[in-house]
Amino acid sequence: MLEVTDLTLKYGQSQILNGVSLTARPGQVTAVMGTNGVGKTSLLKAIAGRHPYAGGTITLDGKPLDHLTAFGAARAGIAYVPQGREVFPMMTVAENLASGFACLPGKGHRVPDHIYDLFPVLREMTGRRGGDLSGGQQQQLAIARALITRPRVLLLDEPTEGIQPNIITQIGNVIRTLRDQGEIAIVLVEQFFDFAYDLGDEFVAMKRGEVVLRKPAADLSREALLAEVSV
Ligand SMILES: Nc1ncnc2c1ncn2[C@@H]1O[C@H](COP(=O)(O)OP(=O)(O)OP(=O)(O)O)[C@@H](O)[C@H]1O
């Protein structure tokens, strides 16, 4: 279980996160929602070791992840799929996937079949350059690359952004499959309300760097959540 407690984060003198707390459990989707600029990406960056945080704690199964680097966080089991995907454009699909092995011990890794079973389109495109894939295919590649690292926590930053509807459905199905397998805790940052609402087991709504609502799906109506995350 991932526990973030009282997290604060600054860019220079600007306080961006102000005491943010959330929990992500294996086999569940924790959906983090809020309008542009409330600090959702900054929160994921702090968890993923991409930006230092000023205060608070992050623990995984009770063990502190003390200000890890991005590599350290990946080694500890935190996989991050950034907004905009960050696929390596000049590297092939196979090479992009193989880059995920860097944080695993040992050598001679091969892409497990279950990754291609989740994303069959990637199996057909192993030799194609990342930059030549469609946006939807790049998103699938970015999620697949994250799963290569055998994470315990999967951080997804706006996976539906700029993606066509049929691929959004496929990505939703992948998230559901991962959730139902019960091993990975998923933190989903998403502004596509219905997508997040359908998938979320727990909801965290943010405003101006603070959590204004934190509730399990069972205790929250669609209207109540919509009211908290609308402009
Ligand atoms: N590197 C940076 N330096 C300074 N300010 C930043 C930096 N990155 C983000 N910010 C500011 O921090 C605030 C939170 O940004 P963040 O990207 O975390 O929000 P967000 O909720 O993910 O927004 P969006 O949905 O638009 O991605 C914004 O006001 C943003 O302008």
Image: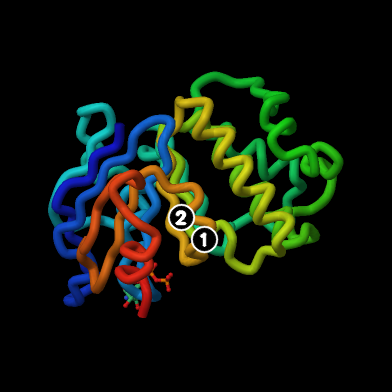
Seen at 64% across and 68% down, the residue is 162
Q: Residues within 10 Å of mark 1 (few under 14, many from 20)?
A: few
- Residue 197 marker: 2
Seen at 63% across and 42% down, the residue is 173
Among the 4 quarters of the image, the one containing residue 118: top right
Is residue 67 found left or right of 159 in the rendered image?
left
Is residue 140 found left or right of 66 in the rendered image?
right
Q: Is residue 41 visible?
A: no
Q: Count up the numbered dots.
A: 2
Q: Position of residue 163 (x, y in %)?
A: 67, 64
Seen at 47% across and 32% down, the residue is 151
The foreground one among 68 and 167 is 167
Q: Residues within 10 Å of mark 2 (few under 14, many from 20)?
A: some
Dots 1, 2 in contact, CB < 8 A: yes
Seen at 31% across and 57% down, the residue is 43
Is residue 36 found left or right of 85 in the rendered image?
left
- Compared to 165, does 208 lie above or below? below
| Residue positioned most to the bottom | 231
- Residue 77 marker: none
Task: Tell me the kind of residue under disc 2.
Answer: Tyr
Q: Position of residue 18 (x, y in %)?
A: 16, 64
- Quarter of the image with the N terminus is top left
- The residue labelled by disc 1 is 194
Q: Position of residue 188 (x, y in %)?
A: 44, 51
- Quarter of the image with the C terminus is bottom left
Task: Tell me the kind of residue under disc 1.
Answer: Asp
> What color scheme is it?
rainbow
Give the secondary structure at mark 2: helix
The foreground one among 200 and 4 is 200
Q: Is residue 178 visible?
A: yes
Estimate the spatial distance between the alpha carbons at disc 1 and disc 2, rounded to whole Å: 5 Å
Give the secondary structure at mark 1: helix
